[in-house]
Amino acid sequence: MATDSKQRPVYVISVAAELVDMHPQTLRLYERKGLIRPGRSSGKTRLYSERDIEHLREIRRLTQELGVNLAGVEEVMRLQHELDDLQGEFEAEIERLEDELRERATAPQPLPAPDGKLDPRDRPVYVISIAAELVDMHPQTLRLYERKQLIRPGRSSGKTRLYSERDIEHLREIRRLTQELGVNLAGVEEIMRLRHQLDSARAHMEGNVQRLQQDISDRMTSWRTLPAPERQVGPEDGDEGDGDSGK
């Protein structure tokens, strides 16, 4: 897979540092901070993948172009690693299901079909005044964060903003980033964009896995209910021994 090739560790630290225009010691610092996760050769030499190079370039963009502090960069890269891991889990699950579809010969276990119900945490229930009180912010701050697309409240039929439990979680996360970690608004935008992307990726993965599981169940049921092939009648199955052959 293309993803596998991007994750293959191939570059030693001197080459990786040259590719991203950083000092090797900077790469070691970022590794200690958990911002990148290079592989190791059998001799314990650091080896960096194409994905690591992408992450290092993203770190440089965040720090040099957007002025995000190291605490904000740590949050961004933690979410990016979660997305990478989720992609790996999804691909592994797809491969497992494909193997099961090819090899499974027993009766399928009943699996619930996706019902398409909305996650309760995504149900918009709080008007802006209540949401602002829950997160200890001014309603105008919530409007600002919406314009910046840091949160995405729903709307009632009368166009009133309605916030979900997930929106409340995101607002509390924004407060933590700005007040506790000192992350600037540009850094918060990057972090929340990744959080929304991660939420969407998880929902997409769960939906795809459910559909594949249901497909396996449907196919297994179809195979087990196919009629048995009719037995062909050959010459050896003729009227032998009926006693009338000489008449």
Image (spheres, rainbow, N blue to C red):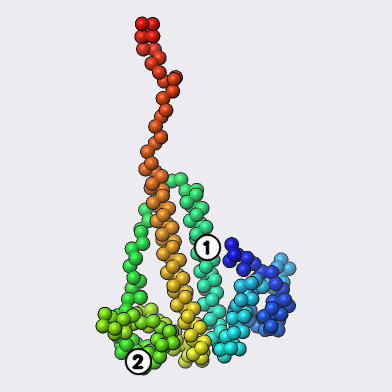
The extreme left residue here reads 158
Q: Is residue 223 left or right of residue 181?
A: left
Q: Residues within 10 Å of mark 2 (few under 14, many from 20)?
A: some
Provide residue 40's location: percent of width, then percent of height: 68, 70
Q: Which label's residue is closer to the chain start, 2 or 1?
A: 1
The residue sitting at 31% across, 89% down in the picture is: 129
Q: Nearer the viewer, residue 165 or 56?
A: 56
Provide residue 189's location: percent of width, then percent of height: 48, 85
Residue type (three-letter) at the residue carrying disc 1: Glu
Check the picture and name the quadrant holding the N terminus: bottom right
Tag shown at residue 139: 2
The residue sitting at 40% across, 86% down in the picture is: 146
Provide residue 41's location: percent of width, then percent of height: 70, 68
Q: Nearer the viewer, residue 16 or 69?
A: 16
Q: Is residue 49 left or right of residue 73?
A: right
Q: Is residue 153 left or right of residue 30?
A: left
Provide residue 154's location: percent of width, then percent of height: 33, 80
Say which element carries label 1.
helix
Q: Is residue 86 visible?
A: yes
Against 158, is 184 above or below? below
Q: Residues within 10 Å of mark 1 (few under 14, many from 20)?
A: some
Say which element carries label 2.
helix
The residue sitting at 36% across, 6% down in the picture is: 247
Q: Nearer the viewer, residue 57 or 126?
A: 57
Residue, disc 1? 91
Q: Hey, which quadrant is residue 23 in on the image?
A: bottom right
The residue sitting at 41% across, 83% down in the picture is: 151
